Image (tube, helix red, strand yellow):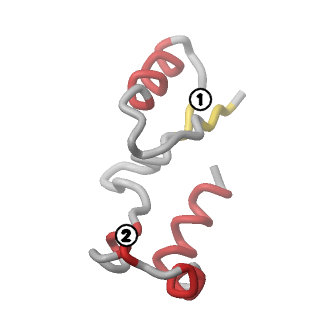
Amino acid sequence: MKIYVASSWRNDHQPGVVHDLREAGHEVYDFRNPREGDNGFHWSDIDPGWETWSPARYRECLEHPIAKAGFQSDMDA
C-alpha cells in the first residue's frame, strides 16, 4: 500500500513519520522530497513575497506552471 503523509510544512514530525513508515516496509510518498533532488513545491518558488498575497493573487498563482507541476506531482503519488 502506498501512503501519503498529508501534513503542513511546519509539522516537524512529518519527516520522522515518513521515515518510520518506510522502516516498517511501507511505500511512502514524501511531498517534501517527492523525487531524488526535488525538495517539493514551495510557493516561494513562484514569489518570495507569497505570504503577502491577496486572495485574488493566490487564485491567479494557482495557474502558474510551478504550482500546477507541484499539484500534479502530489496527484500522481
Q: Secondary structure beneath disc 1?
A: strand
Nearer-the-camera pick, 10 or 69: 10
| Residue extending farthest top | 24
Looking at the image, residue 42 lies above or below residue 46:
above
Nearer-the-camera pick, 48 or 77: 48
Looking at the image, residue 46 lies above or below residue 43:
below
The answer to whether marks 2 and 1 mark residues whose Cβ atoms lie closer than 8 Å is: no
Q: Secondary structure beneath disc 2?
A: helix
At horizontal 57% and vertical 60% (from top left) the residue drawn is: 73
Position in image of residue 25 (x %, y %): 56, 16
| Residue extending farthest left | 48
| Residue extending farthest right | 1
Amino acid type assigned to the residue bearing label 1 in the image? Glu
Q: Nearer the viewer, mark 2 or mark 1?
A: 2
Amino acid type assigned to the residue bearing label 2 in the image? Glu
Position in image of residue 17 (x %, y %): 47, 22
Residue 51, which numbered label? 2
Nearer-the-camera pick, 51 or 35: 51
At horizontal 41% and vertical 56% (from top left) the residue drawn is: 40
Query: How many residues crowd around disc 2 within 10 Å: few (fewer than 14), some, or many (20 or more)?
Result: few
Position in image of residue 76 (x %, y %): 66, 56
Position in image of residue 14 (x %, y %): 44, 31
Q: Quadrant of residue 44?
A: bottom left
At horizontal 33% and vertical 73% (from top left) the residue drawn is: 45
Residue 27, which numbered label? 1
Looking at the image, residue 5 lies above or below residue 50:
above
